[in-house]
Image (tube, rainbow, N blue to C red):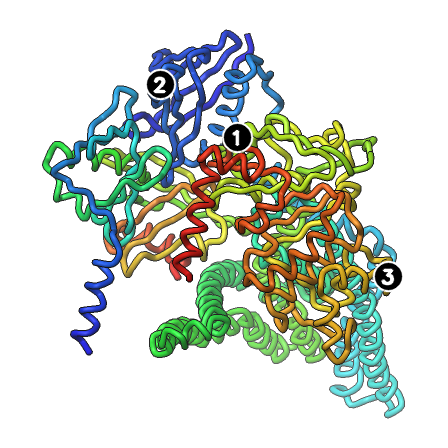
Amino acid sequence: MTTHTFEYDLDLNMQPANGTLSFDETGQIISSAGNEILAQVSAGDVAEMSVIAGVGCGLLCVKMNGGGERLLCRFTMSAMKAAGEFCKKVNYYTKTGEFVQPDSKEKLVCEKCGRPITEGMTICLFCYNKISVLKRALGLMKPFTKKIVAAELFLTVLSVIYLLVPLISRYLIDDYLRPMKGTFAQIAVLAGAMLLARVAGEIIFILSSRVFNKSSIDYANLLRNAAFDKIQRLSMNSLSKRTSGDLIKRVMEDTATIKEFLSDGGRWAAEQMIMFAVVIVILAVTNIKMTLLVFLSVPAVMFGLSRFWKFIHLRYERQWRKNSKCQSILHDIIKGIRTVKSFGKEEIEIQKFSKATRELAQVSSDNEKLWAKLFPLMTFFTGIGEFLVLYFGGKDIIGGSLSFGVLVQFTMYITYVYAPLRWLVSFPRWLAEAMTSMVKVFEILDEEPDITSVAEPKNIPVSGSVTFEGVSFGYKSYEPVLKDINLDIKPGEMIGIVGRSGSGKSTLMNLMMRLYDPSLGRICINGTDIREMSPAHLHENIGVVFQDTFLFAGTFYDNIAYAKPGATAQEVIAAAKAANAHDFIMQTADGYNTLIGENGYSLSGGERQRLSIARAIIKNPDILILDEATSSLDVETESVIQESLSRLVKGRTTIAIAHRLSTLRSADRLFVLDEGRLAESGTHMELLKRKGIYYRLVMAQRQTSKIAE
Amino acid sequence: MENNTQKTASNLSEAVDIGFLDLSKAEFYVTPGGFTGLKYGGEVYQRIVLRRALPVASAMEYISVADHENREIGMFRCVDSLNAGQREIVVAELEKRYYCPFVYQVKSVKDKLGYVYFELSIGRDGRRYDKTCTVKDVSKNIRMLGDDRLIIFDVDGNRYMVESLAELDKKSLSRLGPYLF
């Protein structure tokens, strides 16, 4: 027998527990812990199951058919989402009598470590193989393989050239300078060869840098565009989980971090490792005893350096966060300076900022002091091999078992050994930062959008009837915002949606525009489920005016034509005229080419709203959605806009969320939402006569108007 | 000036009805369904929600009482103003609504790919158990509440409270140290 199960983790006294709530095809809901049955109800006796969220916890409650409520189980936030899903299955059964078969759920917990898998991810970040992240990032560099191989070849040649210089020095010293033999020409040839080697090295360095930089810039561009493209395709549900700042950071900063790592880190790593390997071989072949002296201190130094970097990294992380806090406070104060001054809180804000900067100064100072103590020590111990080489080398020279040229050669090669070692110790941190950025970018690239298009969309004409059939929805699965909405809108009707704040009006509009999909039920246009249409086709034929208008940085023309990129100037002007925006636009010096700045900051609320209306109507949409389009405007401005709206809505299916009586009266029908349910529907007069929720809302509004007089 | 300020403040209290309950007429009880109910002013509320107005600063003061649809019935100033039996019911309900176990020990911290994984020894009411939690955006989700108290939010929204940093053992404090801002 198929069973839905929900694992809860608290007992009724809020102590940790391992309990199971099961719901099977016979309609029995059983709460058990091990073999002990704690509670049992029949779904047939249940009117509704709901999740009640506490603070840091939740509970499942059933409302019984005969009245009364019963507490079934409690759980922490870790089980909240699963509780919501369980609830939906039970409520579907109680409503329809149909038992939904369990679907293949995404893994919520890692099978390897037992840690929860972060929402939106399919892999456990704790167990995520760092090598696989790097492999994936390197895999994306395939289009640049030829360039990178060429750059690596340059680097190899460069390494060989750099390593020739000490060798030439040795021959110059041992064969010509010390024995004081040879001609000036012979010495000049060797010196010239050294000079040539250096010049050739620099030229090759420039060439390889250019190739690496170009490849890494192109790579970063590829990643950036891929991430931005994906963001555009993600649903509102996915986007609302992250802040706009976070998304911007991923597209710009994280891709830049990856680029710097590959162009600088990757290049240096390759160069240093090649040099290191070649130098070790040369040193070992030249003098094994001296080579061992060079490496004597290396293991201890590497260990010390790795501990040092881990320690200093955390301290710098703390400094970064203090700095971030200062910036945050500053940003807030400057952005809200008007509020600060209006309330006379300048002194308090100064003290707040001073405290934050003092803390930052203290942490920075501590870090600098530590760095000043540790860095010289670190440098000394890293280079201690040099002193050992000089001492023992000097002894051997005096004893006649070592030539001066070989010692000079060794001391020159030592820099090629210690430089990569020092660099190698900080490499893990650099790598960790780059991989964190890679994971963040891949997180975006891997996320599947909730709103998808079917393989063969039915792009029927959007004009016509709109129906909501048993629609339920919640932004969080355990907190439904709309419950079992059934409504029917005829073609060409002007519908008003009314209700208190938080009753679900805007959510209804979001579902209508398919910014989200309903959890239950469906929304149809002309009998076709909107999920069977392509989102692009739906959005092309729906015009929307939001309460909070967003205007892009650009001209009046750009903003109006945004909805219809190929619009002619005449169409833009016609749309502006219809929206009563033409007059104020023409009063500006540059007319429709006037730059309006970020989010239209230089415009009044009414002007922005009218631009928004012009943008909505330029594509002549079949369905018009007005989401409290005039709520923030004064009555006079609103009447101007109402006049333009009344021209627009003729013969067009229009759905308007509104509070003002003037809007509501002109609607063909009104739907009244109350706590997510459709409470009333009818014309203005019908609803007034009913003396229900609508009547009370209207009376309250009239009362407020009277007080204002 | 001071008198005027006082006068304005008291006028505000008078002008705005906070809706304090007359506790002598209130009776909290436990329903057969396992919830907390309230009888007040001739009404019977089968399931009420108790909400702390100041859960951080003053957990047992200014408690809001709402019905099952989160419509406020009224408030009361202090849990201590209730008699022993009523206080027990109210405190139990508050403890069930606000779940935030205490952190007794930080056993390990691993920082991987932008997420911090804590192994904690946590508990409430004298019981202790181990718990692994994952924290994202540490600067937002590990917060100091005053000078000595700390709260941690994990990726699921669970909360864990360090009641006193000074009372944590040295190792736990050093593990938490890099994340205290």
Q: Position of residue B2 (x, y in %)?
A: 18, 76
Indicate which disc, 1 or 3, sits on the residue closer to the N terminus: 3
Q: Position of residue A320 (x, y in %)?
A: 49, 66
Q: Which mark is residue A67?
A: 2
Disc 3 packing (10 Å; few <14; some 14–19; many ≥20) = some
Q: Which mark is residue A254?
A: none
Judged by depth in the image, the label closer to the viewer, 3 or 2, is 2
**Which secondary structure lies at badge 1?**
strand
Q: Is residue A27 above or below residue A335?
A: above
Depth check: B132 or A521 in front?
Answer: A521
Image point 53% across, 37% down: which residue? Answer: A672
Image point 25% across, 52% down: which residue? Answer: B17
Chain label for disc 3: A
Find disc 1 in the rendering and name its residue: A483
Amino acid, disc 2: Gly
- Determine contact: label 1, label 3, CB under 8 Å: no
Q: Is B142 left, or right, of A482 in this rendering?
A: left
Q: Position of residue A702 (x, y in %)?
A: 44, 51
Q: Which mark is residue A150?
A: 3
Amino acid, disc 1: Lys
Indicate which disc, 1 or 2, sits on the residue closer to the N terminus: 2
Depth check: A160 or A255 in front?
Answer: A255
Disc 1 packing (10 Å; few <14; some 14–19; many ≥20) = some
Instruction: Give the Cα distance between marks 1 and 2.
Output: 20 Å
